[in-house]
Image (cartoon, grey):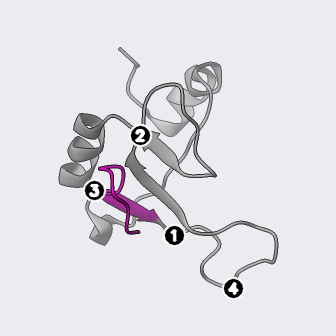
Amino acid sequence: MLRQDEQYRWGVVVDHNANSPVSGGGSCIFLHIWKDANTGTAGCTAMERQNLERIVKWLDPAKNPYLIQMTESQYDSSRKSYKLPKLK
């Protein structure tokens, strides 16, 4: 993850399709700093540096965290069953 810019200054490895990998199931997914709000990635989740720094400080691998990504409407309909906080 060597780059000349700051996109990989901080990062989190998402352990996707790592144990008993399925061919075509994707791999090498990271949380990292974005280039900007209008530039996509090749499968990673990118965000502002300050948000990634908050996640890196909060994340505790010993607690076996999960990354769940969904639309805001999916979040709203799943919030109670997953005991998720209200979005601001």
In space, the residues marked 3 and 1 are separated at their CA atoms by 16 Å
> Upstream in the sequence, badge 3 or badge 2?
3
Quarter residue 36 falls in: top left
Q: Nearer the viewer, residue 30 or 39?
A: 39
Q: Amino acid at mark 1?
A: Asp
Nearest-to-viewer mark from 1 and 2: 2
> Upstream in the sequence, badge 4 or badge 3?
3
Q: Which residue is mark 1?
A: 15
In space, the residues marked 3 and 2 are separated at their CA atoms by 11 Å
Instruction: Specify few, some or many for label 2: CA neighbours under 10 Å numbering under 14, 14-19, or 20 or more.
Output: many
Write down the region rendered in magenta.
1-13
Please, what is the dominant secondary structure of the magenta stretch?
A: loop
**Residue at the far right in the pictured view:** 24
Task: Note whether 55 is above or below 66 in the view shown.
Answer: above
> Upstream in the sequence, badge 2 or badge 4?
4
**Residue at the far top in the pictured view:** 88
Q: Residue at x 54, y 46 (%)?
A: 68
Nearest-to-viewer mark from 3 and 1: 3
Q: Which residue is mark 2?
A: 34
Instruction: Specify few, some or many for label 3: CA neighbours under 10 Å numbering under 14, 14-19, or 20 or more.
Output: some
> Upstream in the sequence, badge 1 or badge 4?
1
Residue 79 in the image, given as x and y percentages of width and height: 52, 28
In space, the residues marked 1 and 2 are separated at their CA atoms by 20 Å
Q: Residue at x 51, y 28 (%)?
A: 80
